[in-house]
Amino acid sequence: MRAGAKGAVAVSPRSFSGYPHDRAKRRERFIREYLVVPRGHGVGKPFRLRGFQREIVRDAFATGIRTVLMSIPRANGKTMLAAALALAELFVGPPSAEVLVVASDQRQANITLRYAKRMVELNRVLAERVQV
């Protein structure tokens, strides 16, 4: 968020070697074990994927899928899901993955980035290992 140099991250990387090899299950497990709701209903509680969100994750990370387009009505957790998936990709995705936050405008992209940043801040293990 801030321009310029960030502080040093002093903790060794976290190992996710015990996680499933299935791409969707890896991301679901990371979200379940590490992420906390940063705002709104359920703030401060563990992030739990709703049924339709779990279905999106499973379909989006199925074998052979490289691009996903989803259309969901307002106020259904799209932005928070995008933040959670961006963090999951950063931690349990392929090494050196490039994680992009893309939205219809800069304001919306910043909201997603703020959610991701707050999710990191709310988990000590993640906060020691990454700067958003």
Image (cartoon, helix red, strand yellow):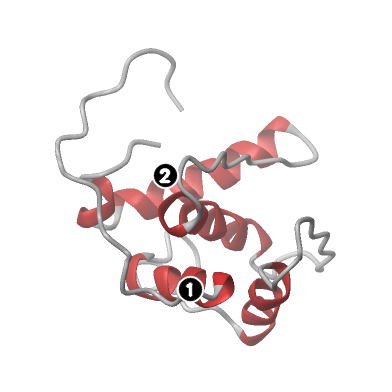
SS at mark 1 in the image: loop
Which residue is located at x 32 percent, y 64 percent? 16
Which residue is located at x 57 percent, y 42 percent? 99
In the image, taking residue 53 as reference, residue 31 lies left or right, namely: left
Q: How many marks?
A: 2
Residue 41 visible within the image:
no
Establish if 86 lies above or below 130. Answer: below
> Badge 2: few (under 14), some or many (20 or more) residues near its Cα, within 10 Å?
some
> Badge 1: few (under 14), some or many (20 or more) residues near its Cα, within 10 Å?
few
Rendered location of residue 78, percent (x, y): 68, 62
Rendered location of residue 12, percent (x, y): 18, 45
In the image, taking residue 89 as reference, residue 100 lies left or right, namely: right
* Mark with earlier residue (2, 1): 1
Looking at the rendered structure, the kind of residue marked 1 is: His
SS at mark 2 in the image: helix
Q: Are marks 2 and 1 in contact (CB under 8 Å)?
A: no
Residue 61 visible within the image:
yes
**Extreme residue toward the top, this view:** 4
Q: Quadrant of the C terminus?
A: top left
Which residue is located at x 59 percent, y 43 percent? 111
Establish if 64 lies above or below 127. Answer: below
**Residue with the mark numbered 1:** 21
In the image, taking residue 83 as reference, residue 119 lies left or right, namely: left
Q: Specify the label residue 117 is tagged with.
A: 2
In the foreground, 113 or 66: 66
Looking at the rendered structure, the kind of residue marked 2 is: Lys
**Extreme residue toward the bottom, this view:** 51
In the image, taking residue 4 as reference, residue 80 lies left or right, namely: right
Nearest to the eye among marks 2 and 1: give it: 1
